[in-house]
Amino acid sequence: MSQTDNNICKDKVFRNIFETYAKDLRNFMFYRTQNMPKADDLMQEAFVKLWDNCNRVNIDKVKSYLFTTANNLFLNQVKHEKVVRNYENQVQNRSNVETPEFIAIEKEFMDKIQRTIESLPKKQREVFVMSRIEKKKYKEISELLEISVKAVEKRMHRALITIREEIGDV
């Protein structure tokens, strides 16, 4: 054969390569995927890539090129499937938390907390809000309200008892 007869881009040469390696390549991909339709797809994609790069591939390296290309396509597919599974798991986990039912229950709970806090006696509510919402320390609260730390503790204790009775542990 002359150099021009070895040109992979010629239909006759390419067809000969296909007939020579297609069955072995498909069997190799079936071994990797355990799925005949996927094996066929990967084999065909490898031949498409060979055709797209026919001017760059040496005729002596065709078999290696096909098997390496098909294997790389398979590995890329596995990576892609892993990314898809991870995304689906994230969406599922998020959708489990953000269902309309969950949102309604959460809103109802938040409304109940708000009503309970508003129903506290003024002095207890004041201490509770400063401590739990504004994140102030008892000492700061005592200085701002000009009362003892012990008085702050007592008001907070009473507020928490009322809230637990109305809502449960917060």
Image (cartoon, grey):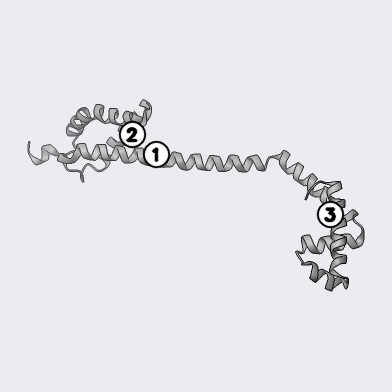
Outermost residue to the left: 2
Q: Nearer the viewer, residue 163 or 30?
A: 163
Residue 45 in view here:
yes
Q: Nearer the viewer, residue 151 or 81?
A: 151
Q: Measuring 31% from the left and 38% from the top, which residue is drawn there?
A: 71
Q: What amino acid type is highlighted by mark number 2? A: Leu
Locate residue 148 relative to residue 25 in the image: left or right. right
Disc 2: CA contacts within 10 A as few (<14), some (14-19) or many (>=20): many
Q: Position of residue 76 (x, y in %)?
A: 37, 42
- Residue marked by disc 1: 77
C-alpha gap between disc 2 and disc 3: 65 Å
Q: Earlier in the sequence, mark 2 or mark 1?
A: 2
Q: Are marks 2 and 3 in contact (CB under 8 Å)?
A: no
Q: Position of residue 53 (x, y in %)?
A: 25, 43
- Residue marked by disc 3: 160
Q: What amino acid type is highlighted by mark number 1? A: Gln
Q: Measuring 80% from the left and 44% from the top, which residue is drawn there?
A: 108
Pick the quarter of the image with the N terminus: top left
Q: Measuring 77% from the left and 46% from the top, which residue is drawn there?
A: 107
C-alpha gap between disc 3 and disc 1: 56 Å
Q: Measuring 40% from the left and 39% from the top, which residue is drawn there?
A: 78
Which element carries disc 3, helix, strand or loop? helix
Outermost residue to the right: 121
Q: Earlier in the sequence, mark 3 or mark 1?
A: 1
Which element carries disc 2, helix, strand or loop? helix
Q: Are marks 3 and 1 in contact (CB under 8 Å)?
A: no
How many numbered discs? 3
- Residue marked by disc 2: 42
Q: Are marks 2 and 1 in contact (CB under 8 Å)?
A: yes
Q: Position of residue 167 (x, y in %)?
A: 83, 46
Q: Nearer the viewer, residue 8 or 163?
A: 163
